[in-house]
Image (cartoon, rainbow, N blue to C red):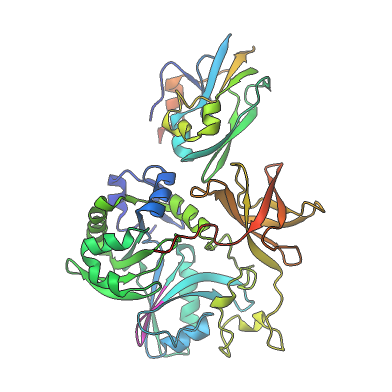
Amino acid sequence: MPTSPLDDLHRRRGAHMTDFAGWQLPLRFGSELAEHAAVRTAAGLFDLSHMAQLRVVGPGAGAGLDMALTGSHAGMPVGRASYSLILAADGGVVDDLIVYRLAGAEYLVISNAANRAVVAAELVDRLAPFDVDLVDVTQARTLIAVQGPRAAAICAAAGLAGVVESLSYYTAAPARLAGIDLLVARTGYTGEDGFEVSAPAEAAERVWVALEEAGRAHGLVLAGLAARDTLRLEAAMPLYGYELTRETTPWDAGLNRFVDLAKPAFVGRDALVSDDGTRVPRRRRLVGVAGSGRRGARGGYAVINPASGQTIGEVTSGALSPTLGYPIALAYIDAAAPSAVGTDLVIDVRGAHQPFSVVARPFYCRSPS
Amino acid sequence: MSIPAELFYTAEHEWVDHPAAGRARVGITDFAATALGDVVFVDLPPIGATLVAGAPCGEIESTKSVSEIFAPVSGTVVEVNRRVVDAPEVVNEDPYGEGWLFAVDVAPPVPSLLDATGYAALPDVTT
């Protein structure tokens, strides 16, 4: 079983560990609600060492990724990050990814831990016709995220002021901290400003402790996967295995803007467009819903049309929103069912029919800084 | 992990302060509260409800999961703790004190319950 290079440190910090995609990772250090709140008001420190880090290197890297993935990657400026999808030939989502252009002929692809092997194998296969090599550096690296409104101040205090000032949202740049070579990206999965730092695995503890100590004066807390999940849900960010599966197309998930149909070919394209070049109709639609009270809707619960009593869909993720104080959920409903903001729905919460209505996504949006 | 010696326990991680005659308070154990994570919603049986030992009588939700509450004893619900309904985090903060869930007028037969030593020896509590 792969182990985070921060495993020992987490246990010394009293983390409640959980199994996630074959990795032992912190579920929470103390109260996950306190960790969630800290990310919204100050900052949280997360270990993301389980995320797959795949380097794609060679003159054919950009063209190869353009064929392998849905986004436009050959034309990305160096230092830019881009959310992208890898599809099966039938248009189903194999995984969602962040692609960073590190140099003219070098990219870093971050994929979900659970999909590491399948994404690496698919990329090797799809990149074979191009002059490019794929190197899985996951276990040689660590990935540490600092997320929250104080994240920039904390990274600056840790000695990363220069790179922090140079980075806008969805950009990345190399940096050095105490002699350690890092890649610092202004990306995240919480709906807050924040940074994700890739470092050599052997330096993981030093980077973590440097950020932890710099963060002490800023209210930084150590945070686990439980808070990460409620944070991403409030930000209405999809999670592979829930909102995104092999049975989901980008159209279903509303991820149209991450699919570059101007590219003449990429894996999955033929399944997404009709012969006349228009998008094939979606079968279902991802919506955000909110309820009242405190009883949450959870993954797998049926969504019902209150007028007809018919089941029209299913919740994929849901929780009592820690920030908003009411239940929120993401759900797929039939494409033909009404889905405008304000549409009333019912969710079967363990036999109790609870009223919900469609709301705009994201559920939570940070105030402009 | 706190397991008070004076209480009685079920394998489903409820505690009851005395299982025989009279009025008994019921709650969930520190182990259960810690395993659940932060409790965000508690659904308790109404006053007057008849409970059957071992049968589900309520629900407790954390951010990550929903668990049923099983009646540790049979009887009639005579009081519910409004405090945990209004502020579910009390269940995490003080599971054997302010975080009690409801009180029951216990009816026979007296079920077989674990004492603190027996509860502490349950495989999932021990590990």
Say which residue appears at 63% left-offset and 22% top-offset. B53
Tell me: residue A35, above or below residue A276.
above
Q: Quadrant of residue A212?
A: bottom left
Find residue A176 and report its horizontal and vertical position in percent: 21, 71
Q: Is residue A13 left or right of residue A359?
A: left
Residue B91: x, y in percent?
Answer: 48, 31
Q: Is residue B97 visible?
A: yes
> Residue A264, image x and y in percent?
58, 90
Q: From the viewer's perspective, tell me whether residue A218 is left or right of residue A108.
A: left
Pick whichever, A237 or A270, lies toward us: A237
For this orientation, the residue located farthest to the right is A308
Viewport quadrant of the N terminus of chain B: top left
Number of marks in the image? 0
As drawn, the residue found furthest toward the top would be: B21
Residue A107 within the segment the image draws in magenta: yes
Q: Main secondary structure of the magenta part?
A: strand
Say which of B94 and A126 sits in front.
B94
Q: Is residue A114 above or below residue B20?
A: below
A144 sits to left or right of B37: left
Task: Find out whether residue A261 is within the magenta segment.
Answer: no
Residue lying at the far front in this picture: please name it. A368
> Magenta segment, which residues?
A100-109
Q: Is residue A145 above or below residue A88?
A: above
Residue beneath the point at 64% across and 64% down: A286
Q: Residue at x 58, y 52 (%)?
A: A328
Quarter of the image holding residue A281? bottom right
* Relative vertical location of residue B82 with respect to residue B5 in this rendering, above or below: below
Q: Position of residue A321 (x, y in %)?
A: 53, 49
What residue is drawn where x is 28% and y is 53%? A218
